[in-house]
Amino acid sequence: MAISGIIFDHDGTLVDSEGVHFSIWQNLLLPYGISFSKTEYLQHHCGVPTRRNAELIVAQHELDISPEELYQKKQHEMQQWLQQQCFPAMPGARAALLQCHSAGLKIGVATGAGQLETQSSLQSHNLDSLVAAVTTREMVTNSKPAPDTYLQTLDALQLRADVCVAVEDSTTGIASAKAAGLACIAVAYDFAKGQDLSRADHYAANLLEAVAIALAL
């Protein structure tokens, strides 16, 4: 098939943010006597929207705090961090989007991240002018792994799922893309190595390789 559009995930795909999220969760949970390991984060929380992670963590560790309170604490810490810096771009991120743009593809971003994080990344790395549509967690009722985020991005791009491909790095993201009817390319960076990427249609070592695969479809 010849594709007309490509939709990228944000966290762990376009930007190297998962390490930051992990560190913030670690620091937040220390006062509760929880030693939050990277293994636990990779197995249960990487690629999962923040609100859902708050629910999982409170339930798993039986914390004396509501999921909403923990979510708000995490959001506050994330905002404080973003006021000082931005997430590093993944290798080849801008070059990959430029290739897509030059090939005439419509580019979207579909993410479980918030608007603050996403816009910070796109603007800081000069990607915003290349992206035609962005859907963040505030814009949908059900975030990933539900299909809503991808369906809304497809609608904004005015594209059908069968002429578009998703680029993801997590089990949750792949499930969302597949539920929306998209073919999916998995990019396995460091924080994706603990993820089950088996439902992806294609696999790439990096974003430039993912775009090469997409353009060959």
Image: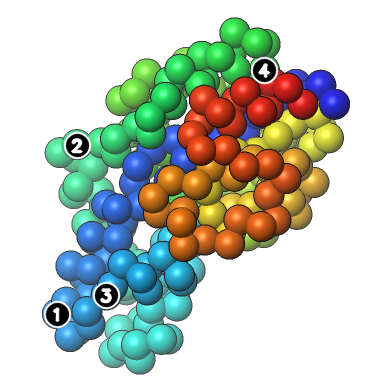
Q: Residue at x 73, y 22 (%)?
A: 216
Q: Who is closer to the viewer here, 129 or 177?
A: 177
Q: CA distance from mark 2 to mark 1?
A: 25 Å
Q: CA distance from mark 3 to mark 4?
A: 41 Å
Q: Residue at x 72, y 45 (%)?
A: 201
Q: Is residue 208 left or right of residue 21?
A: right
Q: Which residue is mark 2?
A: 85
Q: Which residue is mark 4?
A: 105
Q: CA distance from mark 2 to mark 3?
A: 24 Å
Q: Earlier in the sequence, mark 4 or mark 2?
A: 2
Looking at the rendered structure, the secondary structure element under dot 1 is: helix
Q: Earlier in the sequence, mark 1 or mark 4?
A: 1
Of circles 1 and 4, the one toward us is 4
Q: CA distance from mark 4 to mark 2?
A: 30 Å
Q: Which residue is mark 3?
A: 36
Q: Decide: marks 2, 3 in contact (CB < 8 A)?
A: no
Query: Residue 155: x percent and y percent?
Result: 73, 34
Q: Which residue is mark 1?
A: 31
- The mark found on residue 107 in the picture is none
* Residue type, label 3: Phe
Q: Earlier in the sequence, mark 2 or mark 3?
A: 3
